[in-house]
Image (cartoon, rainbow, N blue to C red):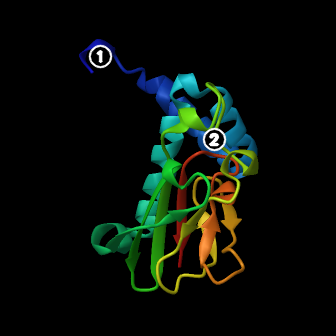
Amino acid sequence: DPDNRRPVDYGKRIQLLSDIKTQWREDAERLLADLLATKEDGSVKLFLLMRSLAARHQFKDVFESGSYEPLEIVGEHSQHVVAYARAEGDKTIVVAVPRFLTEIVEPGSMPCGEAVWKDTAIKLPGDVSGPWRNWLSDRAVEVREDATESLMVKDVFLHFPVALLCMG
């Protein structure tokens, strides 16, 4: 964007990244709350890049040559989530993001938790029952205990409105 071309304050970004890494090690849930409370300062984007690159390093083969499969979303707010899986061998990554949020949350509110997502679920591909870990919240996400083999969006977006789930 030509209107946003200002000099980058690299010192500030380095310090911000260092602070994010320290908070991540100490209390990931608190970090997420702080990031969402100060989303205008760019720290959310820096955090997403940091954790996504860590997952890419850990699951390099999945990101480089894994299969791609769009996932079916079911439930009341199914049209408000997009998700896909990438798989290579016994490793699977699921990426999920919300969309069209003005219909389900008030301006300024975060699309997180059961009150927003109700019965909405992400159907998993094939035999990938877990265990699943969300690399953006550092929390385990349980597979729904019925025949649908799915993840509840209320759990996937419990503390943060984007998910990078890894299995394997």
In this picture, is 161 found above or below 43? below
Q: Residue sitting at 52 percent across and 48 percent down?
A: 80
Which of the numbered marks, if any, corresponds to residue 127?
Answer: none
**Residue for point 49% across, 32% down:** 14
Q: Position of residue 92 (x, y in %)?
A: 46, 75
Residue behind mark 2 = 111
- Indicate which disc residue 5 carries: 1
Secondary structure of the residue carrying tag 2 is: loop
Q: Residue at position x 49%, y 51% from top?
A: 79
**In front of the other: 18 or 104:** 104
- Closer to the camera, 101 or 127? 101
**Amino acid at the residue labelled 2:** Pro
Q: Which residue is at the far left?
A: 2
Would you say residue 97 is visible in this rendering?
no
Spatial distance from mark 1 to mark 2, Cα to Cα?
30 Å
Precedes in sequence: disc 1 or disc 2: 1
